[in-house]
Amino acid sequence: MTELLSTEELAVGRQVRALADAGAASRDPNAVVRAVLARPPRRGLMRLPLPLLATTGALMLVVVVALSSVSQVGSSPATAHVGGLTVAGINIGGTAYGVAVARSIEFSGARLTPVGEARQNSGFRTEGSTVYQVNEVDPLKILVMQLIPGEHDDAGSVGEYLVLVRGNGFSLLCPYFERGDPLAPSVCN
Amino acid sequence: MHLTGMDATAAVPTPEPEVRLAAVRQHDQAAFTHLVAALDHELIRLAYIIAGSREAAEDAAQAAWERLWQKPPRLRDASKLRPWLLSVCANEARQAGRRRRRGAALEARAASGLPPVDLTADLADLQVALGRLSAPDRELLALRFAVGLASAEIAEHLGLSPEGARSRLHRLLERLRKELSHD
């Protein structure tokens, strides 16, 4: 695909490219790799097994964003934006879900079953519109959508799934937080 | 007079390192080094336009590599590796840009030992003008001209329609052109 740019616009574009040329120095790949290898692994804020699914083994759940008061759409200023995108509701099959700030949720070995398509996706950059049930977790309370890789949340983490929550669905996550954990959903306290 | 936009990116290489993702997932250091060699400069170019500083750009690229090594993405389509890296790097650069505006970059520059970027007057003016844009707008320009993505790829990357991406690109270039002509 090509777009039509005027000669003036192209000139500005060339300047942007020249600026990148001027500012970005080439680095020794071996030095970059050495620096990567020298770094200790980044630590998640929380990494807890999901006992609800213990029989299936390998599911790991990582929630790295404060979950308080997000069961209602846009319920507090602290949860009103995620990575600069507006939190909104998603309607799936006529059922409204709030969108959790807990977007940095990661699954390993979980069984994600497609259960429908999101008819509205306000602002979030998801991979398609398919929504998934996570193993046996009640799909009327918690669903997930796959995020476009690389997106950060407000905590600076990169998540793989967007969590859709309905009602007090966050209570399902309480077993995975230690008592008094400030990251725990408010419903758990 | 109008020309096709492809002219603006003809010189930008398009590496195809996706095949190495599987090896990286196995912590194959040689494969990882090949990936870095192929894409590091592209990441830094992107990050430099977004963050506006060489230090922040290199930090952003480094963070992307660290994330790839420590936690490689589970991509169904390995060809998405490059967009994934660009996305992680752009996000790091946006965050670095915010920190920079809060003054942290001055300390980073003092500590980094990197030589200052020597810009011509025109490029210095452009950098100032870019600084007045939002980070997402700088990202769009960087993806187009520093990385060399086509509009359709940019649209997919930024979650826009192709028409939306083209419209925004036109609007941004026109805004920059006017600002630079007034300087």
Image (tube, coloured by chain):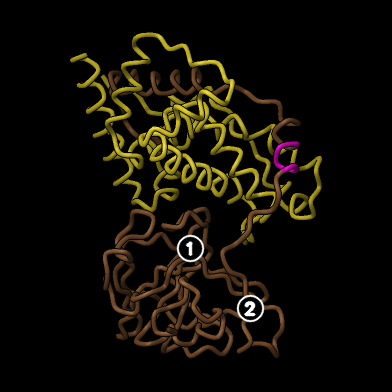
Residue holding disc 2? A110
Residue holding disc 1? A147
Q: Quadrant of the C terminus of chain A?
A: bottom left
Name the tint of chain B in the rendering.
yellow
Q: Does residue A113 appear left or right of residue B145 in this picture?
A: right
Per the image, label 1 sits on a secondary structure element best described as loop
Local packing at callout 2 (Cα closer than 10 Å; few below 14, some 14-19, many 20+) is some
Magenta part of the chain: A34-38
Residue plotted at (18% across, 15% down): B182
Name the tint of chain A in the rendering.
brown
Q: Residue A61: horizontal and vertical position, in percent?
A: 59, 74
Residue B138 lies, with reference to residue A48, above or below; the image says above
Q: Residue A124: horizontal and vertical position, in percent?
A: 37, 62
Q: Quadrant of the N terminus of chain A?
A: top left
Disc number placed over residue B31 in the picture, else none: none
Residue plotted at (75% across, 50% down): B24
Residue A93 lies, with reference to residue A19, above or below; the image says below
Subunit of label 2: A
Secondary structure, magenta segment, majority class:
helix
Residue situated in front as seen by the camera: A56 or B53 = B53
